[in-house]
């Protein structure tokens, strides 16, 4: 089960809204959704997008005005197994050349390298492997992204890295936005 919410910092404090991610297919779509949350407000407002998959991982996307979004994921490998997590696992975040995933996908379509090209079943394939693969490359287990994403808002890198399954509530508490987040939970 997923939970997603937007927290926008305005001159009057934090405003929260839950959000549906059904129409979000790319990081750009998510960034646009965050920027729309401040419609009518200042272009330099901070918007945080929280995405949480129950007991598996959480992610934060921070959008400050027109700047590129900043991303933090609590567990990249767990997020890679999620459609919403895959949106956040960009080439830049994973330290790959931009477009590398698309090139790998195109090559895999042209050449089948798994030994089953003659229609033989792949007995070695096991979906429960601990090593996550996103577009042919291993995704690291554990936190990935901007660990200082909330430092200027009152949560240190150390605090962020120590969060557990109730992460979003703990983050909202540290930011002074617990009450507004609870209204949309």
Image: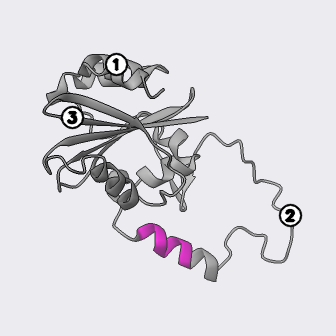
- Residue position marked by numbered label 1 in the rendering: 178
Residue 50: x percent and y percent?
Answer: 40, 36
C-beta proximity under 8 Å, tags 3 and 2? no
Residue 46: x percent and y percent?
Answer: 20, 41
- Residue position marked by numbered label 2 in the rendering: 121
Judge left or right: residue 91 versus residue 21: left
Q: CA distance from mark 2 to mark 1?
A: 51 Å
Q: CA distance from mark 3 to mark 2?
A: 53 Å
C-beta proximity under 8 Å, tags 2 and 1? no
Judge left or right: residue 30 versus residue 125: left
State yes or no: residue 22 in magenta: no
Helix, strand or loop for disc 3: strand
- Residue position marked by numbered label 3 in the rendering: 9
Of labels 2 and 1, the one closer to you: 1
Q: Earlier in the sequence, mark 2 or mark 1?
A: 2
Judge left or right: residue 38 versus residue 135: left
Farthest residue toward the bottom?
110
Helix, strand or loop for disc 1: helix
Tell me where the magenta segment starts and ends, as one range.
Answer: 100-106
Quadrant for residue 49, please give it: top left
């Amino acid at each position: 089960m997923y939970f997603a919410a937007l927290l926008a910092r305005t001159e009057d404090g934090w405003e929260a809204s839950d959000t549906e991610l059904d129409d979000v297919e790319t990081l750009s779509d998510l960034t646009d959704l965050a920027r729309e949350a401040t419609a009518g407000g200042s272009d330099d407002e901070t918007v945080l997008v929280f995405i949480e998959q129950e007991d598996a991982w959480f992610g934060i996307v921070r959008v400050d005005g027109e700047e590129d979004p900043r991303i933090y994921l609590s567990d990249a490998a767990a997020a890679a197994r999620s459609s919403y997590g895959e949106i956040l696992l960009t080439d830049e975040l994973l330290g790959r050349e931009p477009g590398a995933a698309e090139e790998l996908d195109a090559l895999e379509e042209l050449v089948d390298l798994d030994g089953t090209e003659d229609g033989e079943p792949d007995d070695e394939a096991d979906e429960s492997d601990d090593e996550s693969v996103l577009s042919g490359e291993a995704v690291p287990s554990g936190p990935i992204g901007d660990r200082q994403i909330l430092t200027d808002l009152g949560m240190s890198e150390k605090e962020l890295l120590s969060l557990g399954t109730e992460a979003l509530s703990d983050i909202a508490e540290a930011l002074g936005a617990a009450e507004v987040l609870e209204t949309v939970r």
